[in-house]
Image (spheres, rainbow, N blue to C red):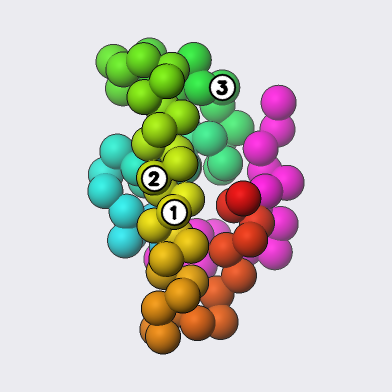
Amino acid sequence: MNHLAALDGVDQIELRRRLAWLTPEEAFVVDQWYVKAAPPEAIATDLGRSIRHVYRVRASAIQRIVALGQAEEFANADVAEFL
């Protein structure tokens, strides 16, 4: 499954800027999921975690990205593509 459609309109610089605000594990999951289109099973294996954990980390990362979009510094950021 190609997850890149969720990132339409976000350039790599903007994505990296947003990822910098995440924990290392959240950034890894988002990068693997959305940029490299890795399946959750592969991400879980790479992390040595369960698939459920990967989904939880992904959800946490998305919430943080959305919160960044609500901060004044990121008021113009469009994070809807991650939902």
The quadrant holding residue 2 is: top right
Q: Is residue 37 above or below residue 47?
A: below
The residue wearing badge 1 is 63
Residue 9 shown in magenta? yes
> In the rendering, at what x and y percent does residue 17 appear?
41, 66
Q: Could you tell me the amino acid type at mark 1?
A: Gln
Part of the protein shown in magenta: 1-17
Which structural element holds mark 3? loop
Mark 2, residue position: 60
Query: Which amino acid, by three-letter code, is at mark 3?
Result: Pro
Inter-mark Cα distance, 1 to 2: 5 Å
Circle 1 Cα neighbour tier, 10 Å, few/some/many (<14 / 14–19 / ≥20): some
- The residue singled out by tag 3 in the image is 39
Where, quadrant-wise, is the N terminus in this rendering?
Answer: top right
Name the element at disc 2. Answer: helix
- Disc 2 from disc 3: Cα separation: 18 Å
Left or right: where 6 falls relative to 79: right
